[in-house]
Image (cartoon, rainbow, N blue to C red):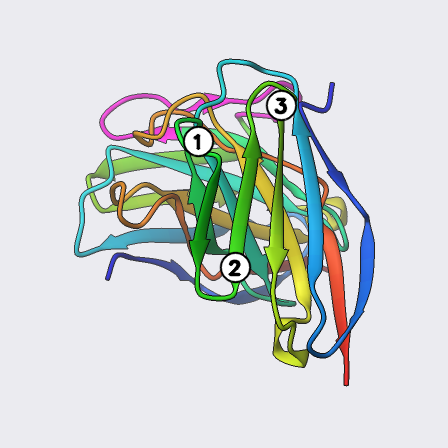
Amino acid sequence: GAVVSQHPSWVICKSGTSVKIECRSLDFQATTMFWYRQFPKQSLMLMATSNEGSKATYEQGVEKDKFLINHASLTLSTLTVTSAHPEDSSFYICSAWPGDNYGYTFGSGTRLTVV
Amino acid sequence: QQQVKQSPQSLIVQKGGISIINCAYENTAFDYFPWYQQFPGKGPALLIAIRPDVSEKKEGRFTISFNKSAKQFSLHIMDSQPGDSATYFCAATPGGAGSYQLTFGKGTKLSVIP
């Protein structure tokens, strides 16, 4: 089946440091990947749409200089949280579309805690 | 503006019962409607999805009912089991080819009690 692999599953970092989250499509190529953020007991909110070989499209209110997205290949998109602060602590999830048989497939998520 | 409204926010069902979650949408351009199941600390997993050309789709114990004129769709879980206890999200998108993002409902926390 089509799998979206996300790494790391959890990370703790100090305030002011940067953290990189990887999202890989296994067994399929993903021209487009989506990055979501989810706060406890809330729904998924789209942060940005990542397009291979071009700049990401950010949702209103999402700081593109803080959340850097790189989609350098058809199987890898990365989200870097720069100068992280405690308010950036959240659950980050990526998604891609392997095709009609699978629908939008999500990674397992990354729990970021900034201390 | 919330484009997909989901209810109820929480639901308690006895084992063996039917769980019903409803969603309503506003954007008539939506043409792909999936349901996701999410366990704590995990990413959402696709349960079942439907397109507007059919009014119902069944996969195992899960059924989607779709009413295009009312712009509503619902998830029915038959013979609910404690293992079904999770948060369920409805979603919608204007394109099923992966180019557009999903718009999610706020979620329903389902608890199935023995």
Circles 2 and 1 on the same subunit = yes
Which residue, as the protein is rendered here, is positioned at the far top? Answer: B28
User: Counting residues from the N terminus, which is met first, the one under dot 2 or under dot 3?
Assistant: 2
* Residue that numbered label 1 is attached to: B32
Residue B62 numbered mark, or none: 2
Q: For mark 2, does the 10 Å Cα neighbourhood hold few (<14), some (14 to 19), or many (20 or more) residues? A: some
The region drawn magenta spans A50-64
Circles 2 and 3 on the same subunit = yes
Q: In the drawing, does residue B79 fall left or right of residue B55? A: right
Measured Cα–Cα span from mark 2 to mark 1: 17 Å
Magenta span: predominant SS is loop
Which residue, as the protein is rendered here, is positioned at the far bottom? Answer: B114
Contact between marks 2 and 1 (CB within 8 A): the answer is no
Residue B51 numbered mark, or none: none
Residue B71 numbered mark, or none: 3
Give the residue type that dot 2 points to.
Phe
Determine the secondary structure under disc 1.
loop
What is the x, y in percent for residue B17? 72, 71
